[in-house]
Amino acid sequence: MPAPTDASAALFARARAVTPGGVNSPVRAFDAVGGTPRFIRSARGAWLTDVDGNDYVDLICSWGPMLLGHAHPEVQAAVQAAVACGSSYGTPTEPEVELAEEIVARTPVERVRFVSSGTEATMSAIRLARGATGRDVVVKFAGCYHGHVDSLLASAGSGLATFAVPGTPGVPESSTALTLVLPYNDRAAVEKAFADHGDRIACLVTEAAPGNMGMVPPEPGFNAFLAETCRAHGALFVSDEVMTGFRASRTGQWGLDGAVEGWVPDLVTFGKVMGGGFPAAAFGGRADLMAHLAPEGRVYQAGTLSGNPVATTAGLTTLRLATDEVYDHLTRAGDTVKAAVGEALNAAGVPHTVQSSGTMFSVFFTEGPVRDFEDASRQDVAAYAAFFHAMLDGGVHLPPSAYEGWFLSAAHDDRAIGTVLDALPAAARAAAA
Ligand code: PLP
């Protein structure tokens, strides 16, 4: 039964009169699935409540950050106490030291610098990589998103391992002329790029496990191969853990491969979970590399709100509460949802594949395996749109795009998961129609 959306529709109309497309980040506009985006009034635990009073199980979780669920009482209390002391001073504070210590303890980085968004984190990591190596070329993979950094909003040029072209108007060719875009999971393409340009490559940046084309896990040993190839050519390996950090596992994607295989990335970017729902992100790495940053070194990087005490308190409280039990719960809840999605789509005869890395997963509306962006692009996006809207009618808010991960939280209890399971069969039939 479609829920009333009058209040959301009215707000969307007002929003469009004052904001491009009515939203402050494009995917929120529902362009990929059609219909009216739900304007959310409040959220608690696993549930969103929109301005029409409809409740939805949230499978977006703010695109990753809400690992503990919405309005977690301890995070709220810590944030309220921090705000009561003042919200930003432009001077060093204790919470940022504590959060840096927590990140250094849980990940392979030795030093960490805070910024306010994942975009800033990757942009700054690349500047640092170029400054530290004295080289200029950056390698990335098609389908990996690293924020709206000009040089990374790039599409592959014609032919393998040629320099990239801008991925959007507004990015000049000069900004992508030093970027190489390769197919993900393709060792031969990486080898060729390094054979052709190795002495100019400052860094290779990759999502530690891509989640921005849906979940496309690195094939076994792929990240180790990237780390080794970079090392052999004097380039830096930048692992973007903005999405996977403290989510794929307690120690991020690195905990699933690097920690097991015995290699470490040179630089790592973080965001999302480590901000606990507030604007906080970071980049970090080996002490000798991070020493190139001002004021220790000569590579400039700064930020008015960087290490903000409210955001770092939210992140610190979230990470301290993100225990092994939380990740065990995410694994169990994810397994239940993945199995039920597969069952429902199979029963309805909808081609699909479910892919995961650690506790993260997504559903592709195409036969698998999906190894790279080209595979992901074969999805039946119309089937996803029908599925999405039927789930919404069943009280479940999925990401409004087929190219996204499905996010759970520690607060997704039996009632929330039960609502997802109940909604699936009808949604699968809608996708088949
Ligand atoms: N890197 C990855 C892997 C991301 O998933 C994102 C955002 O989704 C970013 C970077 C950019 O982060 P932000 O949106 O905070 O700028």
Image: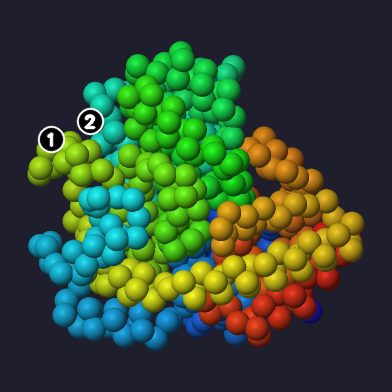
Query: How many numbered circles does the render carry?
Result: 2
Residue at image point 35% right, 65% down? 275
Give the secondary structure at mark 2. helix
The N terminus - image quarter? bottom right
Q: Quadrant of residue 4?
A: bottom right
Answer with the quarter of the image where residue 117 lies. bottom left
Q: Which residue is mark 1?
A: 298
- Residue 390 visible to an observer of this rendering: no
Q: Earlier in the sequence, mark 1 or mark 2?
A: 2
Q: Nearer the viewer, residue 19 or 356?
A: 356
Amino acid at dot 1: Arg
Q: Residues within 10 Å of mark 2 (few under 14, many from 20)?
A: some
Picture coordinates of residue 190, whole percent (x, y): 51, 25
317, above or below 245, in the image: below
Rounded to the nearest angstrom, the CA distance separating label 1 from label 2 is 8 Å
Residue indicated by mark 2: 131
Please name the residue shown 20% across and 44% down the image: 287
Observer able to see residue 214: yes
Give the x, y percent position of residue 263.
Answer: 40, 42
Question: In the drawing, does residue 296 fall left or right of residue 245?
Answer: left
Residue at horizontal 73%, vertical 70%? 391
- Compared to residue 432, the image places residue 192 above or below, namely above
Whether residue 206 is situated above or below residue 248 in the rendered picture: above
* Label pair 1/2, CB-CB below 8 angstroms: yes
Instruction: Check the image and report above or below for 202 versus 329.
Output: above
Q: Residue at x 74, y 40 (%)?
A: 378
The residue carrying mark 2 has its beta carbon less than 8 Å from ligand 1: no
Expressed as whole percent of the image width and height from the top left, the position of residue 406 reads: 61, 62
Front-lying residue, 387 or 204: 204
Q: In x, y percent, where is residue 247? A: 48, 62
